[in-house]
Each structure stands twice: as structure tokens, then as C-alpha cells.
Amino acid sequence: MNIAVLVKLAPDTEAALKIDADRLKIATVDINYVLNPYDEYAVEEGLRWKEKFGGTTTVFSLGREEAVKALRNALAMGADEAVHIVSPGGLDMLGKAKALAAALQGRGFDVIFAGKQSVDDDCGAVGPMTAYYLSIPHISTVVKLDCDGSRITAWREFEGGAEKFECPLPVLITAQKGLNEPRYASLKGIMFSKKKEIAVVEAAPAQAKIEILKLNYPPVRQAGKIVGQGVEAVPKLLQLLREEAKVL
């Protein structure tokens, strides 16, 4: 089984994000970057498929030199090969999908895994768009997956139920929390990741279709009101909910 996994370096979810002075991007000073949490599920699933069906798991990451950290984290978990798609930045979601598809094209992957979204922009679009440019089916936000070697059965949850899909390989799957439990990197894996040579390719050129005009912080919440205590406060509370909050 020839398996690919798309990974990305993202800010630690515990980091306090700040907008840069130009108000066009997030300030990167003093931010700890980690392997995108949803991508950990994708890497784990790729490793499980390799253990079940045999073959090779190759991880791909698009970006500047810092992207290598995400690749080495995936190698430490157990991936076999890594490819850094070098991009100077400035690519929008469409450009990223085109660059990833160009790097994946012609390599004969049976399945491509990716996280359902990255925790920095939360768009969830790059994986499905990459599948589009590869002309293969995709199933997103998957929480359960089976494969008989030639066809897959995948389940995805939605509010109040679940959906079941079947399709042949090759396919691109985006992983949702609950698909598996990502393993910790072993000492052997960490040592391997430090020594492993990472292949480098240039990102395919693409013209941005999306322009960021300005970033703003969410509006500050107004302080709450205390209208009284006990049943005597109920009429005043109902009046405020109806006239000010306009929820009644």
C-alpha cells in the first residue's frame, strides 16, 4: 500500500495569538509551533494502514523551512519518508492545494490522509481541493474507516446522526478527532527522524485568488447585568430579554 499523509506546522492551541502590526497576519514572535493536532490523526491512520497492508508511508508538508519540524515529528511517529514542498509563503488555500497536488501527482498513492482542518485558519478546504486537482474522490471529517485492500468504507458524523460512504481507491481522507488515538514518538523514532534525509521539491507557482484585507480581534463582550434576586427579578429579566437582548 502506497500511503501519503499531508501535515502542517500550526501554532500550539494554548498559545495566545496576536495580530501583527500590519494587521494582515498573526504575529509569530514567542509562539510555539507544533504538528497540527488533526494531522496527528492522519499520520496515525497512515501508520496503521502500513502495519495492516504493508507498504510505505510518506509525509508531505508545504511551507518555509519551519515546515521541516512537522515532517520530523511525523517521522518520529513512524513515517518512512518525508517531502518538503518549499514555498516562500503568500499562497492562498487554492494555491496550496495546487502545489500539494502537483507534488503528489504521478506517485501512485493508494490513499492520502490529511487532518480535517488546521487549527490556525480552520478552513478545512485544502484537503478536498487537493483531491479535486488530483481527480480522485475524497471523504472529509472521517471518524471510522475500513478497507478491504481495494475499496474503503468510511463514516462521518453530523448533528443527530452519521453518514456511511463507500468508494474505490485511490481516495483522499481527512481525519476527524475520534478516528484513532495517535501514538507517542518512540526514542528510536526520534533518533530516526533526526538523521532521516528529507526530500525537497519546489512548490508549483500559483496566483492567489484570495486577498486578506485586514485582521481584527473579536469585539469585547459587554459586562453582564444583575437585575435582582429571587422571583421579584423575573419581570425585569423578561423585559430586558425582550427589549434589549431581543431573544424573546
Image (cartoon, helix red, strand yellow):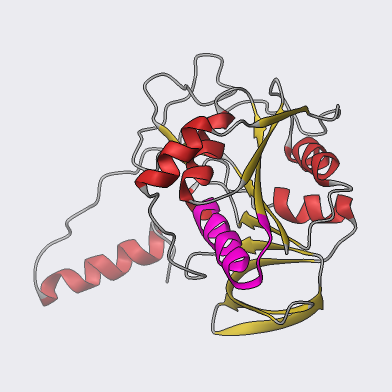
Q: Quadrant of the N terminus?
A: bottom right
Residue 47 against residue 105 in the figure, above or below: below
The main secondary structure of the magenta stretch is helix
Quarter-wise, where is residue 172 in the image? Answer: bottom right
- The residue that appears at 67% across and 55% down in the rendered structure is 56
Q: Quadrant of residue 42?
A: bottom right
Residue positioned 81% across, 70% down in the render: 169
In the displayed image of the protein, which residue is found farthest to the left? 229
Q: Quadrant of the C terminus?
A: bottom left
Q: Which residues are magenta?
A: 39-56
- Relative to 219, is 197 on the left or the right? right
Residue 202's place in the image compared with 52, above or below, is above
Percent across and percent down for residue 244 are 38, 56
Residue located at (42% from left, 37% from top): 191
Nearest to the observer: residue 23 or residue 134: 134
State the residue at coordinates (56%, 15%): 22
Q: Nearer the viewer, residue 168 or 200?
A: 200
Q: Nearer the viewer, residue 78 or 38?
A: 78
